[in-house]
Image: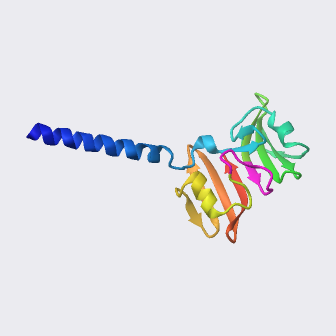
């Protein structure tokens, strides 16, 4: 009798696990890997050291300023046609430029997961879940040393900032 109950209990656990697993696997969340933008079919991640992203975003203006640590130079690229700003850090010793942040204010470029300016909070939560902190009309997701800050105006996304 005990074996029959144990076998039945194991079967119930197996079925519950099979039903719950797909839901858990598809649960939306922000991860460090999602700290990226998508331009056409190209994904550009925060932390990227390649400079190919410049041509993907098009014409830009660049402003240089001293980096926060010795031996570095920071640049702010403004892609006004796309409504995107990209901040980079150039390590002068290695001559490698690293993407430190993206600020999206235009509607043509979105995050790698598909969030765009003009989307609703419901869309944001569908794509990234509810694991955010909230301050006024600003929602912040963090994971793996990277963050995404989404500012709203009313019920629509006004800007998206991805940070290293």
Nearest the eye: 102 or 25? 25
Residue at x-position 71% and y-position 35%: 48
Left or right: 113, with 94 as reference point: left
Q: Quadrant of residue 75?
A: top right
The furthest residue to the top = 94
Nearer the observer, 32 or 82: 82
The residue that appears at 62% across and 63% down in the rendered structure is: 121
At x 70% / y 53%, what residue is drawn? Answer: 161
At which x and y percent is residue 117? 74, 58
* Count of all numbered marks drawn on residues in the image: 0
Q: Is residue 24 in view?
A: yes
Can residue 70 be seen in this snapshot?
no
Query: Residue 132 at x, y = what percent?
Result: 55, 58
Q: Is residue 32 magenta?
A: no
Q: Is residue 79 left or right of residue 36?
A: right
Q: Position of residue 160 (x, y in %)?
A: 71, 56
As drawn, 7 above or below 146? above
Front in this rendered view, residue 113 or 44: 113
Query: Which image quadrant: the C terminus?
Result: top right
Quadrant for residue 141, please give it: bottom right
Q: Image quarter for residue 72?
A: top right
Residue pictured at 54% horizontal, 55% vertical: 129
Nearest the camera: 63 or 121?
121
Magenta stretch secondary structure, dominant: loop
User: Where in the figure is residue 108, as x and y percent of width and height?
Assistant: 80, 52
The quadrant the N terminus occupies is: top left
Magenta part of the protein: which range? 102-114
């Amino acid at each position: 009798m005990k074996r029959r109950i144990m076998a039945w209990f194991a079967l119930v656990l197996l079925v519950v696990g099979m039903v719950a697993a797909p839901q858990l696997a598809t649960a939306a969340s922000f991860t460090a890997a999602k700290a990226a933008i998508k331009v056409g079919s190209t994904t550009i991640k925060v932390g990227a050291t390649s400079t190919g992203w410049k041509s993907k975003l098009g014409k830009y203006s660049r402003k240089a300023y001293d980096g926060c640590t010795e031996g570095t130079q920071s640049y702010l690229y403004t892609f006004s046609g796309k409504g995107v700003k990209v901040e980079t850090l150039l390590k002068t010793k290695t001559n490698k430029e690293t993407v430190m942040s993206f600020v999206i204010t235009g509607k043509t470029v979105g995050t790698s997961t598909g969030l765009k300016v003009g989307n609703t909070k419901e869309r944001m939560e569908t794509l990234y879940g509810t694991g955010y902190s909230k301050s006024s009309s600003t929602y912040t997701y963090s994971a793996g040393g990277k963050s995404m800050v989404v500012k709203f105006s009313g019920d629509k996304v006004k800007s998206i900032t991805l940070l290293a």
